[in-house]
């Protein structure tokens, strides 16, 4: 089945043993700007080793490409800024902190009913404040996985009706 669309982006604290956080712990990270969610694997690095006597490779070594994730949010309220970039909030005013990134678990819920989850990522957000009349100021978010991805299709409950027989 195809995977498409972004319904929600959720986050949870990383578990001490780096296992998958419980579903109940995940909460909304932020609303995403339309079609901004991407999780891409770079091409692998392939190295062939040769001998002086043989024209065919005597060994081929493959290093998988790194994964990069990104999306853009658009909510510049204090609660969202605090979640995405840290800092402090005093008297309803957000003040930027050091913003060295966060280690969190991240989960995407897709329109197709899939859950794409990384139990641990290094997450970083930055302001993209283009103050234009017909453009929304964004918060650009990127992450680097520190764990393997887990993809699961949400189970669909099916109603099974009782068959009635007349006799």
Image (cartoon, rainbow, N blue to C red):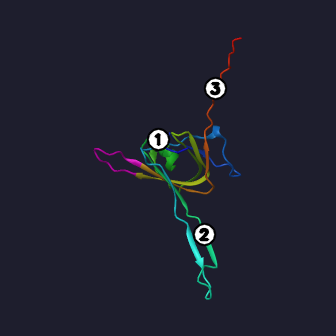
SS assignment at label 3: loop
Label 2–label 1 contact, CB within 8 A: no
Q: Nearer the viewer, residue 46 or 93?
A: 46
For mark 1, what is the residue?
31
Would residue 103 be found to the left or right of residue 70 on screen? right
For mark 3, what is the residue?
159
Nearer to us of marks 3 and 2 is 3
Would residue 119 be found to the left or right of residue 135 on screen? right
For mark 2, what is the residue?
62
**Quadrant of the drawing holding the C terminus:** top right
Total count of labels: 3
The span shown in magenta is 128-138
Quadrant assignment, res 164: top right
Nearer to us of marks 1 and 3 is 3
Image coords of residue 128 (percent x, y): 39, 52
Residue at the left extreme?
A: 133
Image coords of residue 79 (percent x, y): 49, 40
Circle 1 residues within 10 Å: few <14, some 14–19, many ≥20: some
Nearer to us of marks 2 and 1 is 2
Pointer 1 or 3: first along the chain: 1
Would residue 94 be found to the left or right of residue 145 on screen? left
17 part of magenta stretch: no
């Amino acid at each position: 089945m195809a995977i498409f669309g972004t319904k929600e982006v959720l986050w949870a604290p990383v578990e001490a043993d780096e296992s998958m956080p419980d579903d109940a712990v995940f909460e909304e990270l932020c609303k995403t700007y339309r079609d901004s969610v991407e999780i891409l694997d770079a091409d692998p690095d392939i190295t062939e080793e040769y001998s002086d006597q043989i024209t065919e490779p005597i060994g081929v070594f493959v290093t998988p490409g790194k994964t990069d994730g990104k999306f853009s949010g658009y909510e510049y309220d204090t609660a969202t800024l605090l979640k995405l970039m840290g800092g402090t909030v005093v008297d309803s005013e957000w003040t930027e902190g050091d913003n060295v990134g966060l280690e969190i678990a991240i989960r995407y819920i897709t329109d197709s009913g899939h859950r794409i989850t990384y139990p641990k990522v290094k997450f970083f957000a930055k302001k993209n404040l283009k103050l234009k009349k017909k453009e929304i100021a964004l918060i650009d978010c990127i992450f680097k996985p520190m764990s393997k991805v887990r993809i699961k299709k949400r189970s669909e409950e099916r109603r099974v009706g009782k068959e009635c027989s007349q006799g």
